[in-house]
Image (cartoon, rainbow, N blue to C red):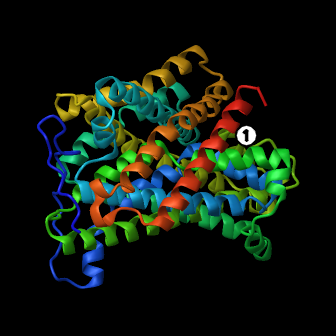
Amino acid sequence: MQANDVHKDEQGGTSLSEVNGTIEVPQNAGFWKTFRAFMGPGVLIAVGYMDPGNWITSIAGGAQFKYKLLAVVLLSSLIAMMLQAMASKMGIVTGKDLAQLTREHTGKVGGFTLWIIAELAIMATDIAEIIGSGIAIQLLFGIPLIVGICITALDVLLLLLLMKLGFRKIEAIVATLVAVILVVFGYEVFLAKPDIGGILTGYIPTTSIVTNHGMLYLTLGIVGATVMPHDLYLGSSISQTRKVNRKNRAELKQAVKFATIDSNLQLFLAFIVNSLLLILGAALFYGTKSSIGRFAELFQSLNNPAIVGAIASPVLSMLFAIALLSSGQSSTITGTLAGQIVMEGFIRIKAPMWVQRLVTRLLSVTPVLIFAFIYHGNEAKIENLLTFSQVFLSIALPFAVIPLVIFTSSKKLMGEFANNMATKILSWIATIVLILLNIYLILQTIGIL
């Protein structure tokens, strides 16, 4: 049975219409040539899984429990791969993104409510990215944090320019920033000389992850911060940037196959980065009792021989700040795109693209700026926003994951590309586990547990 070729009504339109279907795919080409044409969206997705919001938790996990939480990083990454592959497949097969389909199945009031929730999730994600970029600018150039945050807010202008140059340019720039992060942490871990045997053992789950209260809390933080709601909306949209004839079963099958390979490959790189962060925390800070709960503290520790030993140097600190800036900037680019997708899909706003992106950016940056003005000079208070941002992400997650699993399991929507029974079972188990863990994290954060 061929998948339904969904009619795009006048209200819904196409997702990210200015780039939708703009990238040509070679016909009857070899594997590598075809793969190169489809490679790119995955790297935009991957940056959401290695954004500054994950850094402190991953490094703290290594510092407190050495390599034991690597198993959690692995499990979280496998869940992310499955959900993101489903989001890409849904966009390719139906020609609509997750926000558009959710809006169609909920009506006007439900759609508006879900838009508010999704916007809060994007704002929460952007908080970590904006603060991370602002702190990186402060550490690198000595610029006051509030000025760094304002500079970061202007990167929406960069996105507007890049979109004029073509979506491939955005993919290339983000890929370069991801490469910088990977190289920096790979180099720092190499210098730290971690225990390879301990690393391999760390990927094997142990019961202590659940029974040890402190370990469980960090486990919840790692899992809860891994699957990002905005990435599911983004993935379902940018998978449509490749030109595919949905009436041709062979083209659809090829597009789904290569989009899945791209997504899994790039998320594997995100898994490597998150593993490196935890390994770095274990190799440098385990047993030192150092305070590394903030980016500035991490920056200073990497230049302190009393904490990290002979490898301490200003270069190591600067590389960390460069990686932080790369992570923040790449994540804000994708976060702004996700904001546009959500706004268009849920409330079907009719406005020029630059207006939508500017509104999306202002919605995200305003809470951070207000907080920065109130607590000007108190970086610790500003960084505390990161903790609260995770609560919003936890609340929003079910409203993105549940519709995704329902839609991709629907024969009516997906035809022969609907999830098979094994995928249905695994996806629902993953969804329930994510929801329960996030509820637990919320209750702990507000002090009930």
Q: As displayed, is residue 28 above or below residue 360?
A: below
Q: Give 193 or 170, whichever is nearer the viewer.
A: 170
**Amino acid at circle 1:** Gly
Q: Badge 1: how crowded within 10 Å, few (<14), some, or many (20+)?
A: some
Where 37 falls versus 280 (above or below)? Answer: below
The quarter of the picture where residue 361 lies is top left
Q: Residue at x 77, y 59 (%)?
A: 282
Judge left or right: residue 58 versus residue 399: right
**x, y (%) of residue 405?**
44, 51
View extreme (bottom): residue? 30
Residue 34 lies left or right of residue 339; in this view the side is left
Residue at left 23%, top 43%? 161
Q: Quadrant of the C terminus?
A: top right
Snapshot quadrant of residue 39? bottom left
Which quadrant of the view contains residue 93? bottom left
Picture coordinates of residue 277 (x, y %)?
65, 57
Secondary structure category for the residue under label 1: loop
The structure residue drawn at horizontal position 72% and vertical position 50%, both measured from the top left corner, is: 219
The residue closer to the viewer here, 238 or 419, is 419
Q: Which residue is mark 1?
A: 293
